[in-house]
Image: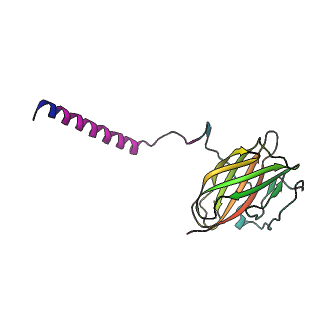
C-alpha cells in the first residue's frame, strides 16, 4: 500500500469515526433548543372552554354584528358560522375537511364590521373522541383582520374542538369554541 493510499484510508476512518460520534451524541443529548415561531417562543394557553363533549352547551346560531355576548362562547359552533364575543365577531374556516395538517383561518372584525389588525390569535385544538390533550398554534395576521395558522396538527378523523382566543391590548381574552368534523381514519 502506498503512502497516499494509507493517508486516504486514515482520512476515511477519521470521517467514519466523526460521523459515528456525532450520531451517538445526537441520540444521547437531544437538542435543548426550543422551537420558535419567528422571534417568539412556542405559545402555551389553557382552554377557556371545557371539552364540548363534557359540557351541556347548546348549539350556537349565526349572530349579527354588535350582538351582546359574553367574553367566552363555548357552544358547539361549526365552520363558517360567525360568533359574536365581547365586541368582536370571529369566523373560523378550514382549508380542507380531511384529517392531517390543516390550515385554519380566523376572520376577526369589531362590532362596527372593521377588521381587527392588532390582535394576538391563538388556536387550541383537541380531538373530541380521543383525548390526546390540547395543541396550541399561533395564527399570524395576513391582512384585513384575517389570521392564519398553517399546518395545524389534526391528524385523526372525527370531531375536533377548535378554540379561538383573541387578545388585544387592554382587553380581556375573547374566546369561542368551534366543532370541526374531519374525514379520515381515527
Q: Quarter holding the C terminus?
A: bottom right
Q: Quadrant of residue 172?
A: top right
Percent coordinates x, y for residue 159 in the rendering: 65, 67
Q: Residue at x 28, y 37 (%)?
A: 15
Where is 83 relative to 11, above or below? Answer: below
Q: Main secondary structure of the magenta part?
A: helix
Write the start and end of the magenta stretch as one range: 7-36
Q: Which residue: 78% across, 50% down?
A: 108
Residue 135 rendering spot, x and y as whole percentages: 62, 54
Tell which of 106 and 77 is nearer to you: 106
Residue extending furthest front? 144
Residue in the picture at 76% in, 43% down: 119
**Residue 21 part of the magenta-drawn span:** yes
For the question of whether residue 186 can be seen, the reply is no
Q: Magenta includes 114?
A: no
Place of residue 44 in the rendered image (x, y in percent of width and height, measured from the top left): 65, 47
| Residue at the image position 86 percent from the left and 50 percent from the top | 113
Identify the image quadrant of residue 1: top left
**Vertical placement of 50 versus 113: above or below?**
below
Q: Is residue 168 above or below residue 150?
A: above
- Residue 92, given in percent of the width and then of the height, sits at 73, 57
On the rendered structure, is 11 left or right of 25?
left
Amino acid at each position: 500500500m502506498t503512502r497516499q493510499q494509507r493517508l486516504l484510508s486514515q482520512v476515511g476512518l477519521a470521517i467514519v469515526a466523526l460521523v459515528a460520534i456525532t450520531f451517538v451524541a445526537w441520540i444521547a443529548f437531544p437538542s435543548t433548543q426550543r422551537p420558535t415561531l419567528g422571534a417568539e417562543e412556542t405559545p402555551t394557553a389553557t382552554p377557556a372552554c371545557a371539552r364540548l363533549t363534557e359540557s351541556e352547551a347548546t348549539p350556537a346560531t349565526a349572530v349579527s354584528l354588535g350582538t351582546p355576548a359574553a367574553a367566552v362562547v363555548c357552544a358547539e359552533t361549526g365552520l363558517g358560522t360567525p360568533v359574536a364575543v365581547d365586541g368582536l365577531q370571529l369566523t373560523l374556516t378550514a382549508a380542507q375537511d380531511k384529517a392531517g395538517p390543516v390550515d385554519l383561518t380566523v376572520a376577526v372584525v369589531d362590532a362596527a364590521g372593521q377588521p381587527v389588525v392588532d390582535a394576538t390569535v391563538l388556536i387550541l385544538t383537541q380531538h373530541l373522541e380521543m383525548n390526546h390533550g390540547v395543541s396550541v398554534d399561533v395564527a399570524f395576521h395576513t391582512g384585513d383582520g384575517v389570521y392564519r395558522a398553517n399546518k395545524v396538527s389534526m391528524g385523526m378523523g372525527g370531531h375536533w374542538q377548535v378554540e379561538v382566543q383573541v387578545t388585544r391590548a387592554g382587553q380581556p381574552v375573547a374566546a369561542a369554541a368551534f366543532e370541526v368534523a374531519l374525514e379520515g381514519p381515527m
